[in-house]
Amino acid sequence: MDIEERNKKYNEYVQAKIPKTKNFPTLIYAFVVGGLICCIGQGIMDLLMLIFPTMSVESATAWMLIVIIFVASLLTGLGIYDRIGVFAGAGSIVPITGFSNSITSPAVEFKREGIIFGLCAKMFTVAGPVIVNGVAVSIVIGLIYLFL
């Protein structure tokens, strides 16, 4: 059996094993779950402004983000956010909750390696490049804004 024939058989095997997704229902689930996460965030913000009438919109937004990040991290630690991700796909990657999940998941996965080499080192393996690029771009944009 030559290499081309072996590659062809392997590709046929892989194509047979790839799970088939139903695009339309997946789009609906992503839309509904992503929208629900955003509605929950807006509800938290509205509730904060109702409870604390003197709170500014900026402060309420900051507190809402803190609550959303905490809840997403807690759900990731409990293994619930992964099930939401399987169901909703991209809908669960609403920016702040998805980022929280991407930091918490490696920390939970590598906690058995200890605090330093497990939690601290692995926590930013996925999110680290995003943070570094975000800081670098914000510095460049800040400098451009400063000199213009």
Image (spheres, rainbow, N blue to C red):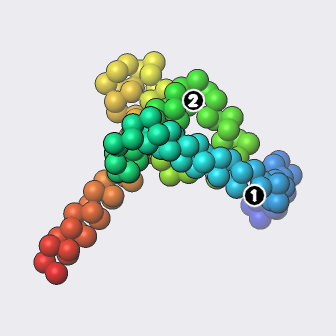
What is the quadrant of the C terminus in the image? bottom left
The dot on residue 15 is: none
Q: Are marks 1 and 2 in contact (CB under 8 Å)?
A: no
How much space separates mark 1 and mark 2, taking CA atoms? 23 Å
> Could you say whether the residue bearing mark 1 is in a helix, strand or loop?
helix
Disc 2 residue type? Leu
Say left or right for 84 vs 135. Answer: right
Q: Position of residue 140 (x, y in %)?
A: 23, 68
- In x, y percent, where is residue 132? 31, 53
Residue 91 appears in the picture as rendered: no
Find disc 1 in the rendering and name its residue.
Answer: 27
Category of crowding for the residue at label 1, using alpha-carbon neighbours closer than 10 angstroms: few (below 14), some (14–19), many (at least 20): some
Q: Upstream in the sequence, badge 1 or badge 2?
A: 1
Image location of residue 37, percent across then percent down: 60, 45
Neighbour tally class for label 2: few under 14, some 14-19, many 20 plus, Cα within 10 Å: some
| Residue annotated with mark 2 | 75
Q: Is residue 6 left or right of residue 56?
A: right
Residue drawn 58% across the image and 49% down it: 38
Q: How many marks?
A: 2
Q: Three-letter amino acid code at disc 1? A: Leu
